[in-house]
């Protein structure tokens, strides 16, 4: 019997344990298909004596970002106070992503997600991936050409 389901579950558990507050799972809305994970990412744009300018994005693989109607799974540890919904539905989902050439990734500015939380009376309490812990070119090359589960 294959160890693949156990390995898959162990991989998911390890990701959630180590960087769970940096991840936001999503899927095609109302269907049990096209599951994916987006990662919160901070880009340091500029540092001055008074301030740092940071842009925040969600980063994911290009293909799953192409659906028109998607839902994010909202875990309680991702916001304060706890929200009443477990899912956040997004229409025109594909239009919110910028695909980065042939890198196979897409990015979405998080401004709209923060505005949604503010309208609903909660705020995101996420951890972001930064350049210091982001995958390197060598890490990405080692993944191969075919999609794999996060």
Image (cartoon, helix red, strand yellow):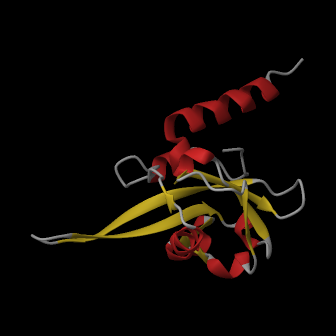
Q: Quadrant of the N terminus?
A: top right
Q: Quadrant of the C terminus?
A: top right
For residue 77, which quarter of the picture? top right
Q: Is residue 41 above or below residue 95?
A: above
* Residue at 51% across, 49% down: 22
Provide residue 85's location: percent of width, then percent of height.
Answer: 71, 57
* Residue at 68% across, 27% down: 10
Judge whether residue 140 can be spotted in this image. Answer: no
Judge whether residue 15 can be spotted in this image. Answer: yes
Provide residue 73's location: percent of width, then percent of height.
Answer: 70, 54
Seen as rendered, the residue at the extreme left is 49
For residue 101, which quarter of the picture? bottom right
Q: How many marks?
A: 0
Q: Is residue 79 above or below residue 17?
A: below
Residue 101 in the figure: left or right of residue 134 = right
Q: Is residue 116 above or below residue 78?
A: below
Provide residue 137's location: percent of width, then percent of height.
Answer: 46, 53
């Amino acid at each position: 019997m294959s160890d693949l389901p156990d390995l898959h579950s162990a991989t998911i558990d390890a990701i959630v344990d180590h960087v769970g507050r940096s991840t936001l799972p999503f899927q095609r809305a109302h269907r049990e298909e096209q599951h994916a994970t987006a990662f919160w990412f901070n880009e340091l744009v500029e540092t001055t004596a008074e301030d740092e300018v940071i842009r925040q994005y969600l980063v994911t693989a290009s293909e799953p970002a192409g659906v028109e109607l998607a839902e994010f799974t909202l875990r309680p540890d991702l916001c304060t106070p706890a929200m009443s919904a477990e899912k956040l539905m997004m229409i025109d989902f594909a239009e919110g992503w910028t695909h980065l050439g042939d890198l196979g990734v897409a990015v979405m500015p998080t401004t709209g997600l923060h505005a949604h939380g503010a309208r609903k009376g909660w705020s995101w309490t996420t951890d972001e991936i930064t350049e210091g812990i982001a995958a390197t070119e060598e890490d990405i090359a080692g993944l191969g050409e075919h999609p794999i589960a996060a």
